Amino acid sequence: MTTDTIFGAINNFLENIDDFVWGIPLILLIILTGIYLSVRMKGLQIRHLGKALKFMIRNEEGGEGEVSSFGALCTALSATIGTGNIVGVATAIAAGGPGALFWMIVAALFGMATKYSEGFLAIKYRTIDDDGHVLGGPFYYIENGMGKKWRWLAKIFAFFGVCVGILGIGTFTQINGISSAVTNFFDPNAAWSLTLFGRNISWVVVITGALVTLCTALVIIGGIKRISNVSQVVVPFMAVLYVLFAVTLLACNIGKIPTAFAQIVQGAFGFGDGISGIRAVAGGVLGAMIAAMQNGVARGIFSNEAGLGSAPIAAAAAKTKDTVRQGLVSMTGTFIDTVIICTMTGLSIVIAGSWAKEGLEGVAITTDAFQSGLPFPAIVSSFVLMICLVFFAFTTILGWDYYSERCLEYLTNKNRTAVKVYRWLYVLAVFIGPYMTVSAVWTIADIFNGLMAIPNIIAILALSGVIAKETNEYFNKK
């Protein structure tokens, strides 16, 4: 048996596990949790969205914490808004048709209730040291909310969180995405290359990798406050830049929007001429509907992370003493990520018809949509998309460093030395990321990412009575 055969068997085994972890059971668990919480809190995410958006930009005075509520939200968004908003939407629509976008939005609306609950619990059960250092998230609302006897479940969540950060989602996949995007724009044919690790590698990859590693080190070595400060500048900038170009595209094709919406709604239930190929593969109308639902929901959850338990780690650091307020601020992250940004990406792709063009996949679908729909030369549209991808991926690197650091703190009983060593290991992982080609590493990270959700969802359901009671009391008083 050759080495390639062995590695192929390992990859197939890991991919089967990944498909199982991110299969129908976990997706249903997350969606049904969102529906259950929405009912218990009487549609809070719709009724109080305006108040949530107001709280998002108005920081609370006198609250305890390390960063402002807006800073905590931007830290969470830095990890949430990423390549999934550009690449994930494209792959979902390519696999499930335009209807995938419909189910992505539905999942996000229910996911807002889950994200609210995560932010609420993060503040209620966090710990603050005498020196003002804050630690909170699923591990603390499991231990402090469910009781010490559940600490083993909290440890499992923290372990998965560290693995996700260092093994791929926060490092290898992001820096690889950055270097690939920059290389495809500046040196697609590898005209300027050198031999490294037995392979021809473009100088653009080497330079990009070194610059991103340096920027990462300068930010994360400074801790949460520096990550928050950078995120408060970069996240709004990158989101506004991307939304601006998406709005321009939609404005230039405003006459096609009603038809696109019709395709999206029809595709959601397995109808429409544009998805005949998907119906054939999926086995009829019902199969096409299930394909649209599965791809839309899965990619939506992967993009906005509602239920995964990552965002409450950042929310716990917010300067606030109001659990409901922070819960509302936290849920705006899902609204911004999926309902706004993913919807704009999806509409652009459906309007251009890029999802149905043969030979296109991943980022190439979104690139084609921007090139077709924007009134600029193709090279300008490609450049803008590359810049957005770079910013999205870089801020994901920063956000996941913070998440995994806090998980490590919990695992090591707040050992600061372990955290400092981990930061340098994280920087090292970013440095070697552009040269990594082992897909198994990314699959393992994807598996750990999915496994994080299980302890978190268990805790949210166990504490849902507390969430609903205090939330309803809060709004009844108001």
Image: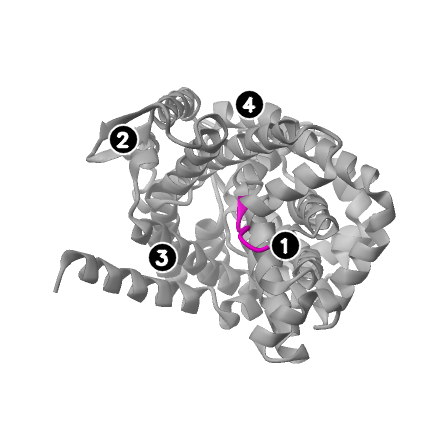
Q: Given contact means CB atoms under 8 Å apart, are the residues at marks 2 and 3 in contact?
A: no
- Mark drawn on residue 421: 2
Q: According to the image, label 4 marks what residue?
A: 229
In the displayed structure image, the side of residue 243 where residue 445 appears, left or right: left
At label 3, the amino acid type is: Ile
Q: Residues within 10 Å of mark 1 (few under 14, many from 20)?
A: many
Q: Residues within 10 Å of mark 2 (few under 14, many from 20)?
A: few
Residue for point 47% across, 53% down: 144
Q: According to the image, label 1 marks what residue?
A: 355
Which image quadrant is residue 240 in? Answer: top right
The relative height of residue 414 versus residue 236 in the rendered view (above or below) is below
At label 1, the amino acid type is: Trp
Does the image show residue 210? yes
Comes first in the chain, label 2 or label 3: 3
CA gap between label 2 and label 3 equals: 21 Å
Q: According to the image, label 3 marks what residue?
A: 156
- Front position in the image: 246 or 188: 188
Helix, strand or loop status at disc 2 = helix
Which image quadrant is residue 242 in? Answer: top right
Helix, strand or loop status at disc 4 = helix
Q: Is residue 360 magenta?
A: yes
Does the image show residue 42? no
Residue range corresponding to the magenta coloring: 358-363
